Image (spheres, rainbow, N blue to C red):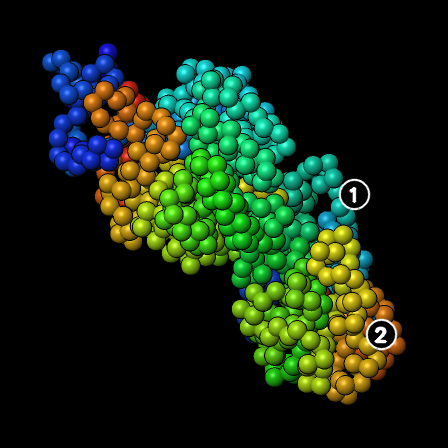
């Protein structure tokens, strides 16, 4: 089979050089990415998995905060689009030597990087870069603000499995307050018409989230039977979180997806997790490997979604130059 | 000899209750009942307001130690351009102004380089560390007008109580930046809808209000005046209103940004909108304006906090807190409090910049009474103009008000009978 570019009719539906947040996207833009991702997913099933869409482009994976899966996913996506990839991590960058983010970015631009994928511990860091660079900037997670490609791969997975987003009941469970995944998912799901429920310790799910148009639920047991999707976020109990809830044991007692709780889910209800999972904490170990779990689909779809995002933003940037 | 006649202006001197069209005479740098000798200079003040020289009792001039941000000289130029003849400097210099030699150094340096009157304050605690009392009495002898750990807040209530009690011996005001460190943590913006959306650590109203309440209790316990700086929340206004109604010697201060802007501006992640305490909501703005209108808040100030561009142009949560304010505060308050909200009269607004801070600090400023220093600000309350930060006389440019259209400004600033700035 000849490896050719999938037919993409994005027309005027995507004009952004950067992907910084889901909040700023229109539903049409989200669907444009999802549709493109669908086309790119077929590429991954071919014998020759590479297309020439970004040949001659340089992508910099700039990860100021450690990450393995997101970085690898972007790297593979870039390879499949034939881009050249450079990885820079916090420990190898001049940020360690006190160079400012602005100066590091200007240096990357001076080297004619075309796309910068940024993971950073500060909310707004990718917007900061995007406003100062002509290169495309893709937000791969900025503090507790947003992680747009994670939300896109989540809604892609839901749409693929259940055929729609509109009208679904989706619960996001766990540490919402500090989660960029939760925020991006809330925006994506709301914009596509889902009903979103947030569940977790009240210290980690403050009422202020209700003004984002979601329901804050105090007990997982209250809503289990109604759900079409349950998305479990990684919960940690390291130094900073010790003031927020007493122990992982107590967390599991109220919010862990145990076998007993899972029996009350609808048979079609999807079990999701952005990873890495803590078996026996957020989710019972067998359930993670069970038929309702789509955790590995999420990983596979992440590649297609990121290919679509890189392709669309790079094309828009080329038109703007 | 600084002799001068200011002719035909609308004199508003809240300290003496004067509010009339009349001439002001200056003889030998003092306000005089008798005209100066013939051939002395005359300034026409037709259609202008002639006010006592304005006092900003909350500025950070960064000298000694951080002169790349501001100096006593450049800060004073910005003050003069904003209509201020006197400023009160906060002691979070580098090193902190926590002893008599530091105070004396600032007074000497200001005498040599500053074009306006500079009144230093001293730290409440050594090194602003909140651990042990600074040599308050020695600093009084050296010339401080108040004590404050501003930028920091003494967390130990017992230590604060002793410092307030000690200050009473010198009839000294205690100025407090109200912030509970445990509650605020690493907060960088108002805790509410926008902090939730943006994922930035929140700075809850209660983090301020709990210290306002602490100060009310200590002012009552020690019968000493405590001034709560840069109030930002509706709850603080409610607490202060109740306390003042009960006669407790506690006062409050308002900065213009807290009524000009809301936390929504931070969705730009622009650190020009980052200051401490943070911008809050429209509900807080309404309460602060109501607090000014009913006399709960009695003092206006800028919290002028200059930072270099490279320091501010970083990730939002890593940027330093603070904005410049000396050149925009009077115009912003005139625009918002006088023209737009009609919350107070011009006479009341001038009182909040003159007699009120002068009385709190026990300084002989803020009046056009006979024999007073001839510090005078001429104001055109109706002049429409646009603020441009590249024209600022401050050494720094960290303002959120670039390009704002404002109504009203100072047009001439006179210190001891001498014009130090004119538009």
Between residues A110 and A30, which one lies in front from this camera angle? Answer: A30
User: In the image, which disc is placed on residue A284?
Assistant: 2
In space, the residues marked 2 and 1 are separated at their CA atoms by 37 Å
Chain of the residue on which disc 1 is drawn: A
Circle 1 packing at 10 Å, graded few (<14), some (14-19), many (20+), is few
Location of residue B80 (image quadrant): top left
Marks 2 and 1 belong to one chain? yes
Q: How many marks?
A: 2
Element marked by disc 2 = loop
Q: Could you tell me which residue is drawn at 47 percent across and 17 percent down? A: B142
Of B177 and A140, the residue lying toward us: B177
Q: Position of residue B196 (x, y in %)?
A: 58, 61
* Tag 1 residue: A92
Residue B376, placed above or below residue B328? above
The residue under the point 70% across, 59% down is: A244
Rendered residue at 50%/48% (across/down)? B213
| Label placed on residue A56 | none
Q: Chain of mark 2?
A: A
Label 2: few (<14), some or many (≥20) within 10 Å? Answer: many
Query: Helix or strand or loop: what does disc 1 sit on?
Result: helix
Q: Quadrant of residue B18?
A: top left
Q: Is residue A235 above or below residue B334?
A: below
Within the image, what quadrant is residue A207 found in? bottom right
Screen quadrant of the C terminus of chain A: bottom right
Q: Residue at x 33, y 36 (%)?
A: B356
- Residue B93 appears left or right of B339: right
Residue A63: x and y in percent read 74, 51
Q: Specify which label sits upstream in the sequence, 2 or 1.
A: 1
The answer, for residue B154, to whether it is visible in the render is yes
Give the x, y percent position of residue A283.
81, 72
Side of B276 relative to A255 (left or right): left
Of marks 2 and 1, the one in the foreground: 2
């Amino acid at each position: 089979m000849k490896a050719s570019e999938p037919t993409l009719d994005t027309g005027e539906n995507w004009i952004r050089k950067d992907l910084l947040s889901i909040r700023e996207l229109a539903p049409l833009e989200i669907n444009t990415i999802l549709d493109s991702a669908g086309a790119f997913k077929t590429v991954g099933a071919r014998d020759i998995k590479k297309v020439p869409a970004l040949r001659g482009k340089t992508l910099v994976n700039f990860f100021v905060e450690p990450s393995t899966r997101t970085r690898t996913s972007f790297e593979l996506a870039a390879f499949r689009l034939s881009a050249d990839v450079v990885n820079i991590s916090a420990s190898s960058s001049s940020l360690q030597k006190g160079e400012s983010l602005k100066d590091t970015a200007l240096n990357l631009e001076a080297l004619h990087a075309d796309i910068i994928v940024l993971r950073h511990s500060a909310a707004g860091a990718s917007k900061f870069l995007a406003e100062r660079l002509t290169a495309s900037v893709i937000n791969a997670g900025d503090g507790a603000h947003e992680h747009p490609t994670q939300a896109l791969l989540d809604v892609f997975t839901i749409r693929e499995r259940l055929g729609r987003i509109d009208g679904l009941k989706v619960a996001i469970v766990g540490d919402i307050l500090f989660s960029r995944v939760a925020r991006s998912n809330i925006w994506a799901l709301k914009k596509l018409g889902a009903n979103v429920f947030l569940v977790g310790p009240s210290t980690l799910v403050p009422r202020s989230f209700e003004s984002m148009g979601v329901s804050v639920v105090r007990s997982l047991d209250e809503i289990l039977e109604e759900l079409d999707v349950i998305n479990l976020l990684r919960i940690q109990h390291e130094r900073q979180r010790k003031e927020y809830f007493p122990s992982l044991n107590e967390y599991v007692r109220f919010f862990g997806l145990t076998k007993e709780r899972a029996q009350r889910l609808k048979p079609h209800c999807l079990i999701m997790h952005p990873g890495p999972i803590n078996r026996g904490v957020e989710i019972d170990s067998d359930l993670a490997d069970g038929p309702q779990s789509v955790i590995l689909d999420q990983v596979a779809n992440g590649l297609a979604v990121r290919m679509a995002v890189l392709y669309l933003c790079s094309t828009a940037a080329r038109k703007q130059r | 000899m600084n002799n001068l006649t200011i002719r035909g202006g609308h004199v508003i001197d809240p300290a003496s209750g004067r509010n009339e069209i009349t001439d002001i005479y200056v003889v030998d740098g003092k306000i005089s009942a008798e005209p100066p000798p013939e051939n002395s200079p005359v300034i026409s003040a037709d259609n202008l307001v002639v006010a006592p020289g304005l006092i900003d009792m909350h500025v950070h001039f960064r000298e000694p130690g951080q002169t790349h941000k501001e100096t006593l000289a450049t800060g004073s130029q910005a003050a003069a351009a904003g209509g201020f003849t006197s400023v009160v400097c906060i002691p979070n210099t580098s090193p902190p102004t926590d002893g008599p030699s530091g105070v004396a150094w600032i007074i000497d340096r200001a005498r040599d380089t500053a074009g306006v009157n500079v009144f230093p304050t001293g730290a409440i605690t050594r090194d602003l560390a909140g651990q042990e009392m600074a040599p308050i009495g020695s600093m009084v002898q050296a010339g401080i007008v108040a004590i404050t750990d501003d930028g920091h807040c003494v967390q130990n209530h017992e230590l604060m109580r002793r410092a307030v009690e000690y200050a009473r011996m010198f009839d000294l005001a205690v100025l407090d930046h109200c912030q509970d460190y445990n509650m605020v943590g690493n907060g960088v913006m108002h805790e509410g809808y926008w902090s939730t959306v943006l994922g930035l650590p929140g700075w809850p109203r209660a983090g301020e209000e709990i210290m306002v309440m602490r100060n009310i209790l200590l002012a009552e316990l020690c019968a000493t005046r405590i001034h709560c700086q840069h109030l930002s929340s509706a709850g603080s206004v409610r607490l202060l209103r109740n306390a003042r109604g009960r006669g407790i010697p506690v006062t409050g201060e308002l900065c213009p940004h807290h009524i000009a802007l809301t936390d929504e501006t931070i969705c730009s992640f622009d650190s020009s909108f980052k200051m401490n305490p943070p911008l809050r909501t429209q509900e807080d703005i309404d309460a602060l304006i109501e607090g000014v209108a009913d006399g709960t808040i009695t003092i206006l100030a800028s919290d002028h906090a200059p930072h270099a561009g490279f320091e501010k142009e970083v990730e939002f949560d890593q940027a330093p807190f603070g904005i410049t304010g000396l050149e925009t505060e009077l115009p912003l308050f005139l625009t918002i409090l006088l023209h737009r909200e009609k919350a107070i009269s011009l006479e009341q607004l001038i009182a909040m910049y003159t007699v009120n801070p002068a009385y709190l600090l026990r300084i002989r400023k803020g009046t056009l009474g006979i024999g007073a220093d001839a510090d005078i600000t001429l104001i055109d309350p109706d002049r429409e103009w646009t603020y441009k930060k590249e024209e600022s006389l401050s050494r720094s440019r960290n303002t959120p008000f670039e390009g704002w259209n404002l109504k009203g400004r100072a047009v001439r600033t006179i210190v001891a009978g001498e014009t130090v700035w004119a538009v």
